[in-house]
Amino acid sequence: MSERRDTGRYESIQHFSNFPAKVFVTSIRSSAYHWHYDYELIGVLKGRVDVLYGIYGPEPQPLDAGDIILINPKDVHGLRGIDPDNVCLCVQFSPSLLEPVPAGMNYYFYLNSADERHRPKLPMTDYMHDISRIALANRREDTDAYLRKNAWLYMLLADLVKGAQYELQSASLNNEQDMKLVMSISGYIDGNLSSENLAGSICREFGLSEKGVYLLLKNVMGLTLKELIDIARLEHACSLLQDTSISLQVISDRCGYSGEATFYRRFKSAMGVTPGEYRKGLKANTIGQDVQDYLSYDEYGVGVLLDQWAEK
C-alpha cells in the first residue's frame, strides 16, 4: 500500500526493483484527497465508485463494473465507494516508464470509460484485460508469472500510448527546495486551521507574497492556496467526525469554518453527504486512520473476478 506523509495529501508510492509498478485489489469506502507522482489506473471489478477531482473540480466521475480511469501525476483526487461491495483494481506506475519523450515533456492522458469524450481508439476492455492479467500474475511468485507480469505491464503502456487520448505537456521543473517549501506550507496549514486570516499568516511565516504563494502552489500541485486550505479542512473534519463525542459545532470551529451552516454546506458539496450522514456511515464500518479507507474483501471472489476480466 502507499505510505502517508505527515501532510496527509502527498502519497509516496514505493516500487520494488523486481517490478516497476504497484498493484493491489481493494474495496474502497472513501479516500481523502491526495496526490502522487505516479500514474494510477483504477479499474472497477465489481460495484460502483465515484472519483473526485478536488473540491473545486468537475462533478464526481461515476465508475461501474468494467469502467476504468487513469489519474495523471499530481492530479489531486479522492475516491468514494457508492456500492459497499465494490472491488477495485489499482495499478500505479512511474512516468519514467513512458520515456523517452521530448525533453521537458510528459504524457497527460485522457482515459475515462465513464466519459464519452475520453473514449480511446482501442476497446476499453483491452485495458481491463491488461490490468487484470497483471494482477493475476502479481498474485503468483514463480518465474513464469514474474516475466509475464512485466510483459503485460509494458503491453499496457503500449496500449495507452497507442489508443488513449493524450497530449504532451511541459513537465514541471519542481526542484527539491520548492517541494520542501510546499510540504512545510501544507504542514503549517494542518496545524493552524482555526487561525483567522490563515492565508496572511502563511505569507508572513514563509516570507512570501500572495502572488509568490499562488505561483509556487500552482506550479508544484496545481492548486491555489484557498483550495489547499479547503482540502485540509475537509480532511480534518472527516478525521474528527470519527469521534462521536465531538459536536458538529466544535468540529466546525476546529477546522476554521465561519459557522456550522458553512461547514455543513461545504462538506456536503465535497463529500456528497452531510457531516451527520458521514458520521452515521462510520458507525457501520471499521474505519482506518490512514489516507485511504480500504475495506476487506473476499479473496477467492477477487480471483474469480480477475479471471473473468482477464478473459474478456
Image (cartoon, grey):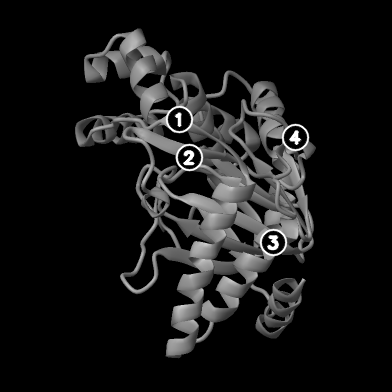
**Which numbered disc flags the more N-terminal residue, 3 or 2?**
2
Tags 2 and 1 touching, CB below 8 Å: yes
Q: Where is residue 42 drawn, in percent x and y?
A: 62, 56
Say which amino acid is labelled 4: Arg
Residue identifier under label 3? 126
Q: Residue at x 39, y 34 (%)?
A: 105
Residue placed most toward the observer, 167 or 47: 167
280 is higher (above) or lower (below) than 56: below
The answer, for residue 245, to whether it is visible in the render is no
Q: Residue at x 66, y 22 (%)?
A: 262
Residue identifier under label 4? 117
The residue tagged with tag 2: helix, strand or loop?
Answer: strand
In the image, 75: left or right of 200? Answer: right
Q: Residue at x 42, y 88 (%)?
A: 143
Q: Where is residue 17 drawn, in percent x and y?
A: 31, 70
The answer, for residue 171, to whether it is visible in the render is yes
